[in-house]
Image (cartoon, grey):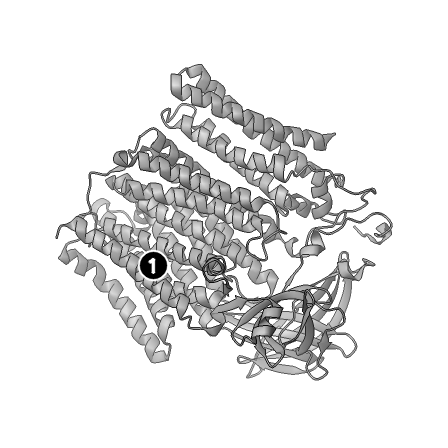
């Protein structure tokens, strides 16, 4: 009974969607307020039925109703409840429904929040939001329905179970976070489209979406970082970023969104770059959909892709529809978008922002190019050439370093024009800091990108520090406040600015972590109990090889004692070799898994993988990696989140 | 020159430099592992291709031979359709590597043997495969 209710809810949502669009569209023609109110309620109804469908599916997953194909495929009786719920986004149709669910949360908040505000913009905002909902409703209703009945001529006693790789807390958080980001950009996009339709190109739409954009950006950033963290801790290849097509799919909208977050400041303050901002938000939203397309279509082989499905062409059609409709609309409104203001000088903050924007877009394009290189090369030359991480690194390291440098330069430039005297005054200390650290690094023996990256990091940190100190000093002089009060007051008076600086500091930390990658060391070897192996200045002794049977897997555990070359004890590592579903009579269904163990310090991570076990001879095959500075990436991530929260925190007076 | 033109020039400059840079890296990658051509096993053997290539196929049943001296060294037969090719691989094998697994290998072809330095497995069938009824799945085995 309930599964039918789920399908019915999706059907009703679809019907309500059509009604919403029609009602509000007629309202925009004849202005009958009653139509608008009806439309609003219908739109809330669409979201309501989507909530209902999602809760029904979640409930069916929890009670293990294997009559539903989705439940049987992604959970089993043994699956812990948390992962039964997370199975909601583990598979294709469920994840599409989950996407809808998040979009509906956003849509509901937007509608309720703006019941009495933005009357000019809201009708088309609602229409745009519902059109996006409709697209996903078509998919979940007609293409891949999560409530599809199980096709089996026997009673399904137990489901397939969730992939053990996905049975991990991060994996339960990473997809929803990423989705909150991806889907979140639908809101600013809708406001943009509405501004275009209404020919209302004043900074109004920008003001109303600033916070939304930051929220979406925050979630997207967190989603990406969590994904890297999960890959690092679970997948066992020792890295957190592989330039996998799906990673790129989340990185591309992040790049354009970051550009957008910066350039809306200029439109807010100077009413410039109207066209550019429109282009950026359209691109960001399109890239979010495109990202879902890459994940779901199976065009690219990747750890993330589901088996080939019929979704590809539909998604691609939707991507083209968005592009053509949005840019077509923009083209007809181009005269309204012309700004009266002009850039005045290269040494102005506007120009700094513009330059930073262009570099972000260039980086996005280069990632796009690399991701689609196999497709492009096949179309042009007939051979499918795949590109790997070295390609992306080669292209993007210089671009990334330019961005890092701009992070330092931008805040030091004044609006409109920076005078020579100011230039010298602002830049002397940071540049000296950067240069002196470069010299020290060169003397120590570092070369190339490492020197550039670290010294740029020092430069940026110096600019951020000066900005804070200058602000505190000014308040200290003017209001006689203590440094701490001054800091508090200063930040609360201009949250977005100082929050932004904190985010920049987080980025510096992350770059330091990325740079550590240049010194990674790895070695694979085999050990018997009592034997020792050396890697990068450490000794690894296999103390004991034990085994144990646990509820859902069997594990071999190696007890490794790590010491420095001089005998100083460092840590004990216990990487495991596991076999999941080990009781399954069908050998092919048992799944081996390497559970790694990491010893992590600020300086370096010692990363151990138990790749295989030879039970007859008692030999463990171990892979050790020594990865310097990885922790800085995660710390940088925390700082980034903290900074964004500062920028997002509501002002007391509003 | 007014400031508008200057900015236009700057924008064009950035675009030109970027296109040049991306194009340059695409044609002259610094690392030989940056790119690999995806080909069929048949074409690889017929054309005796010596550049870095990527192949896809199945691991032939019973063909995996692990070296007696070093557990990491292994050879197996890659099957694509009816074409078979011997592959040598000497790194940590992925967990899902076994007879019948669908794999993608990257490396170089030399004198009839493919020397792979990357091996990826696909696990498509495992979680979207057939469902189990009571007979093929012993419920008493299930704990918690």
* Residue A98: image location, x then y, percent: 58, 40
A328 lies left or right of A136: left
Is disc 1 placed on a helix, strand or loop?
A: helix
- Please state which of residues A464 and A579 is positioned toward the viewer in this rendering: A579
- Please state which of residues A570 and A74 is positioned toward the viewer in this rendering: A74
Q: Which quadrant holds residue B78?
A: bottom right
B36 lies left or right of B80: left
State the residue position of label 1. Answer: A403
Q: Residues within 10 Å of mark 1 (few under 14, many from 20)?
A: some
Position of the C terminus of chain A, as image quadrant, is top left
The residue sitting at 31% across, 46% down in the picture is A263
Chain letter of the residue beneath label 1 in the structure image: A
**A245 vs B95: above or below:** above
* Residue A416: image location, x then y, percent: 19, 47
A180 lies left or right of A283: right
Position of the N terminus of chain A, as image quadrant, is top right
Q: Which quadrant holds residue A514?
A: bottom left
- Residue A492: tell me if it is visible: no
* Residue A539: image location, x then y, percent: 59, 80
Quick one: which residue is furthest to the front in this view?
B46
**B49 vs A70: above or below:** below
Quick one: which residue is furthest to the left in this view?
B1
* Residue B134: image location, x then y, percent: 85, 48
């Amino acid at each position: 009974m309930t599964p039918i209710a789920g399908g019915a809810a999706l059907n009703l949502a679809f019907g309500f969607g059509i009604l919403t669009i029609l009602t509000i569209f007629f309202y925009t023609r004849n202005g009958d307020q009653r139509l608008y109110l009806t439309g609003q309620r219908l739109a809330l109804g669409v979201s309501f039925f989507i909530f209902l469908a999602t809760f029904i599916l979640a409930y069916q997953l929890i009670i293990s109703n294997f009559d539903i194909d989705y439940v049987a495929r992604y959970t089993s009786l043994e699956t812990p409840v948390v992962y039964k719920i997370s199975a909601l986004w583990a598979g294709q149709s469920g994840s599409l429904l989950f996407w809808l669910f998040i979009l509906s949360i956003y849509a509901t908040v937007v509608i309720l929040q703006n019941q009495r505000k933005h009357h000019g913009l809201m009708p088309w905002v609602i229409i745009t939001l519902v059109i996006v909902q409709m697209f996903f409703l078509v998919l979940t209703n007609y293409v891949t329905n999560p409530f599809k009945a199980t096709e089996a001529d026997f009673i399904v006693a137990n489901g397939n179970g969730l992939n053990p790789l996905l049975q991990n807390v991060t994996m339960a958080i990473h997809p929803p976070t990423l989705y909150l980001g991806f889907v979140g950009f639908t809101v600013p996009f809708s406001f943009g489209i509405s501004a275009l339709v209404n020919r209302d190109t004043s900074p109004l739409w920008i003001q109303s979406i600033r916070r939304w954009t930051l929220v979406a950006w925050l979630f997207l950033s967190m989603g990406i970082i969590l994904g890297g963290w999960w890959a690092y801790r679970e997948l066992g290849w020792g890295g957190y970023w592989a330039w996998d097509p799906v990673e790129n799919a989340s990185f591309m909208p992040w790049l354009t969104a970051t550009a957008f977050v910066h350039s809306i400041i200029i439109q807010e303050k100077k009413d410039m770059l109207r066209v550019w901002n429109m282009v950026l938000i359209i691109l960001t939203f399109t890239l979010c959909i495109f990202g879902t397309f890459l994940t779901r279509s199976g065009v690219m082989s990747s750890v993330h892709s589901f088996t080939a499905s019929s979704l590809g062409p539909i998604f691609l059609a939707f991507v083209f529809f968005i592009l053509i409709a949005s840019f077509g609309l923009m083209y007809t409104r181009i005269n309204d978008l012309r700004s009266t203001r002009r850039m005045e000088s290269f040494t102005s903050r506007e120009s700094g922002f513009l330059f930073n924007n262009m570099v972000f877009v260039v980086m996005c394009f280069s990632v796009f190019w690399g991701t689609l290189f196999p497709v492009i090369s096949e179309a042009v030359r007939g051979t499918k050439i795949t590109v790997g991480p070295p390609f992306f690194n080669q292209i993007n390291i210089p671009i990334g370093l330019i961005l890092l440098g701009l992070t330092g330069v931008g805040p030091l430039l004044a609006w409109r024009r920076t005078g020579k005297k100011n230039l010298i005054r602002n830049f002397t200390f940071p540049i000296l800091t950067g240069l002196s650290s470069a010299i020290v690094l060169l003397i120590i023996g570092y070369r190339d990108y490492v020197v550039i990256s670290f010294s740029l990091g020092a430069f940026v940190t110096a600019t951020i520090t000066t900005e804070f100190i200058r602000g505190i000093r000014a308040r200290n002089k003017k209001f006689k406040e203590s440094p701490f009060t001054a800091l508090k007051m200063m930040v609360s008076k201009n949250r977005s600015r100082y929050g932004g600086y904190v985010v920049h500091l987080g980025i510096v930390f992350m770059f330091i972590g990325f740079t550590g990658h240049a010194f990674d060391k790895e070695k694979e070897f085999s050990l018997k109990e009592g034997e020792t192996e050396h890697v990068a200045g450490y000794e690894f002794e296999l103390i004991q090889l034990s085994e144990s049977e646990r509820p859902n897997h069997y594990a071999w555990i190696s007890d490794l004692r790590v010491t420095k070359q001089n005998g100083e004890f460092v840590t004990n590592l216990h990487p495991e070799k596991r076999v999941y579903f080990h009781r399954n009579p069908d050998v092919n269904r048992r799944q081996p898994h390497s559970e790694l163990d990491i010893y992590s310090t600020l300086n370096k991570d010692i990363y151990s993988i138990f790749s295989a076990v030879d039970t007859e001879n008692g030999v463990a095959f171990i892979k050790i990696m020594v990865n310097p500075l990885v922790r800085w990436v995660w710390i940088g991530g925390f700082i980034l989140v903290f900074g964004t929260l500062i920028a997002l925190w509501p002002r007391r007076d509003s | 020159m007014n400031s508008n033109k200057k900015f236009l020039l700057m924008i064009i400059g950035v675009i030109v430099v970027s296109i040049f840079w991306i194009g340059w890296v695409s044609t002259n990658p610094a690392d030989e592992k940056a790119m690999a051509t995806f080909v069929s096993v048949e074409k690889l053997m017929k054309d005796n291709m010596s550049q870095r290539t990527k192949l896809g196929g199945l691991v032939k049943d019973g063909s995996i031979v692990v070296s007696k001296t070093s557990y990491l060294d292994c050879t197996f037969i890659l099957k694509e359709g009816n074409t078979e090719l011997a592959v040598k691989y000497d790194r940590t094998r992925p967990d899902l590597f076994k007879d019948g697994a669908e794999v993608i290998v990257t490396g170089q072809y030399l004198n009839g043997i493919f020397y792979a330095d990357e091996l990826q497995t696909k696990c498509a069938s495992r979680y979207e495969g057939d469902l189990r009824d009571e007979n093929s799945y012993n419920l008493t085995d299930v704990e918690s």
